[in-house]
Amino acid sequence: MEKMTPAMQQYYAAKEEHKDALIFFRMGDFYESFGEDAKTIAKELEITLTTRGKGKDGEKMPLAGIPYHAIDNYLPRLIKKGYKVAICEQLEDPKKAKGVVKRGVVRVVTPGTAMDSSMFSDSSNNYLVALYGDKGEFGLSFLDISTGEFLATQLTDEEPYDRIISELARMGPSECIMPPSMLKDAHLKERIKDLRIIIHEFDEDLFDHKIAEKVLLDHFKVSTLEGMGCSELLAAVSSAGAALRYATDTQMRELSQVQTLKTYFDSEFMVLDAITLRNLEIVRNVRGEGNDASLIGVLDETKTPMGRRQLQKWLLKPLISVDAINDRLDAVSWLHDNTLVRFDIRAHLSYVKDMERLVGRVIYGNSNARDLVSLKKSLESVPLLLASLQECEGIELLESTSSKLSSFAELDELAKLIDSAIVEEPPLSVRDGGMIKPGYNEQLDELFDLSKNGKQWIAKFQQKERDRTGIRSMKVGYNKVFGYYLEVTKANISQVPDDYIRKQTMTNAERFYTPELKERESAILSADEKMTALEYELLTELNTIIASHSRQLQETAALIGTLDVLANLAEVAANNNYVRPAITSDCRLLIRDGRHPVVENTVPGGFVPNDTEMDCSENQFQLITGPNMAGKSTYMRQIAMIVIMAQSGSFVPASHASIGIVDRVFTRVGAFDDLASGQSTFMVEMVELANILNNATPKSLVLLDEIGRGTSTYDGYSIAKAVVEYIHNKGRVGVRSLFATHYHQLTEVAASLKRVKNYHIAVKEDGDDLVFLRKIVPGATDRSYGIHVARIAGVPHAVTSRAKEILEDIEDECMLSEEDRKGSKKKQRSSAKYTQVILFDQDASYGESAPDPIVEELKKLDINSMTPIEALNKLNELKGKLA
Ligand code: ADP
């Protein structure tokens, strides 16, 4: 085997240490990759694959490289495809290196541990989640190293892991790490992948509770995790320790921006599962492309990235405590009413930059002077914000925000310090000087004078030499390779004096120097060099000072985020004509003139508002009929969205609203094909339905749209009817539900189920035309108007008129069989060719009686397996139910 070059030895050493990563190996102006890595990179990035020399095995070595300055362009593409990339840098200046330049891996880039802003967006956190399960208890820890946020929770869950998936869906991490034992669970893995989260395996041992706890204790320099609220939550601690360890390993340094770990419980928030988030388009539209046409798209007029991220968190985690919601609403309301204050606050906020991430970069050590100017400008807004908030007495959330903000008075000094040090528009690079203001550092000022005087000297020298030689066009120039020179055009070459020493020949000129010029050159250059080195040193010092205030800076950033969201919600409420909802602990939902916050902005003819009244008694269950396109689904969603907005602390699109706390919103709406995961629409529908039926509580709100559509009419109708009965009787008290159906025959069920009420969306027939009135009104429809809708949609007249004929036949037949069933005419029952006919037949039983839950329960009893005492108790229980 041929001997490997020292550089290749370094490469193989890096690869050996980071087997699961692609290596970006810095060579001069390129990041090179070799062997299998090169093939992968060339394929994924569509760049040229070449070969060179020979590798370990003596074969030609595949090679692919990208220019170092294009890394921000290429790296995110690999990371998003699920690769890890280890960056192997030159660890010393190649010019100064003796022998081969030292190289080593400085960080491993993964989606959830990226610090590079090219890898994530402003509007959401970039979380890594570590997931660990033990005996049905699951720990989930979310870490965003770009902001320092670190959260842990513990859930009890079992297959199909609905709670874990819900939590992952709303937190939206970009990467999930799990121990190998959990990765064996193909079902869990699939569900996580469906959320487009990249999964990486992490060492089982590092999830061990003892080891994980030690990682946390050491990092936070504490002796117990009690203060963080998770000392007893073993699975949460395991996951948090592993998350921190993984992130530290990839960054290869201590993550001092992570200052604390917060434990939270999902019982503090309204539960919104992955399906509901998607169906209601809370932060993303259904196609998953950006936030146009989503709730956040309408509600986000925030001024700062912290506000934007905070708003998203509030919408994804609506509260369930009346007091906590009212605290938010009080603040929004005050800012809504005090328009000028709101304008002022929003104007000051517009100068605040992404402080959270700026501070993250300062602590991490990859900030530049521009970051510090941004930080200064952000801090300068704080006193102005405080001044605007002076009048907010009695408004708890605003008062506490303002008093916490003012407690960090030392940050004013910090802003002044940055202001005295850094020029207004510093360069991006931290290595080329030009960042520090005159007057900040004496030594730097002296060097500056030296360099400046030197340059003045050069100007005088040029004049002196022109006078001496009579060459008027002679210039003193400078370049990096040759330093300072005197340039004389070929035409004047004869006038050059003897003491000029030739330096370089150009096409039209000659370049010279003199000993005098040479001497000055070294003085000027060394002053310049010393200056840039000193500037870098001063910047680093300043960073250290800023980093020592990181806790206060991070808290300030979070407080500004809160203020931004509150002012934003007030602004949006004022602009969109929303009202403050009353929040109650009972289960009434009263909405007057409710609107759909997103659809109201898109319908050309103006949105028709609707009223809603729901409670836990007669108005618990709305069974809604109406033709397709009438507005059933919009109406149902608008109620869910109003509830979510209200419990997040927002005003709502209505003229009046009173919201009885909802603990979970469930939706089964639309029929999204989930072909990618290999499940049929009907299967998806039933899985979602099962989740709802199993988990809805008396405080939940259930939205069901067209249940049973994905199967045959018999099956579908039967399932729909059984579902209505089940929800109505669930826990004997039922669940607040809206149920839209095209089976208008189902409306008869309202007669026998006392908490079900029929509603329909009014339409007006105008000859053959159908006018959608978009108004929800009590009562059932008796027609489905499908043929009308088909006609409006442009289905050829021949088809719709034929369909009409067929329908008339069916209706006739139906009449006949109805009479037949009642025995009033002795006609032979016609064969039930058409579904409608059968449905009416089945329907007939609804008018008489619905199955009695007690009779049903009796039927199910297995007397043989009961002890006499159990039988007696059961009898007593059933009797109790009858009372
Ligand atoms: P359905 O669920 O009954 O098929 P949708 O709720 O999908 O009907 O509504 C169909 C369309 O009707 C919507 O896309 C919207 O453009 C319009 N629409 C719905 N509700 C209203 C309303 N209240 N006011 C005005 N237009 C509405």
Image (tube, rainbow, N blue to C red):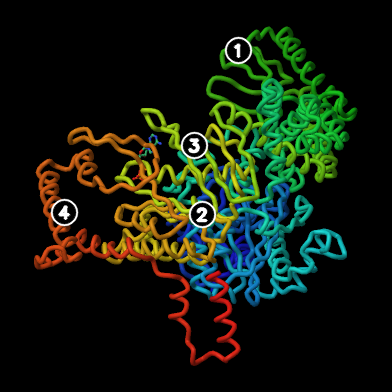
Vertical comparison of 469 with 349: above or below = above
CA distance for labels 3 and 1:
88 Å
Mark 2 neighbour class, 10 Å CA radius: few under 14, some 14 to 19, many 20 or more = many
Element type at marker 2? strand
Q: Is residue 84 above or below residue 398?
A: below
Mark pair 1, 4: CA separation: 110 Å
Q: Amino acid at mark 3?
A: Gly
Q: Which residue is mark 1?
A: 492
The residue beneath circle 2 is 736
Frontmost of labels 1 and 4 is: 4
Which residue is rendered at x = 55% and y = 56% of the image? 700
Task: Please give the name of the residue rendered at 62% of the width and 45% of the height, measured from the top-left corner.
Answer: 647
Figure check: 82 above or below 659:
below
**Three-letter amino acid code of the residue under disc 1:** Asn
Q: Bin the neighbour count of mark 1 within 10 Å (Cα to Cα): few under 14, some 14-19, many 20 and up.
A: some
Marks 4 and 2, how far apart at CA: 34 Å
User: Which of pointers 3 and 2 lies earlier in the amino acid sequence?
Assistant: 3
Q: Quick check: 271 above or below 36? A: above
Q: Quadrant of the N terminus?
A: bottom right
Foreground: 73 or 636? 636
Task: List the residue tagged with mark 3.
Answer: 594
Asked which quadrant contains residue 787, the reply is top left
| Image position, residue 670 (x, y; %) | 38, 52
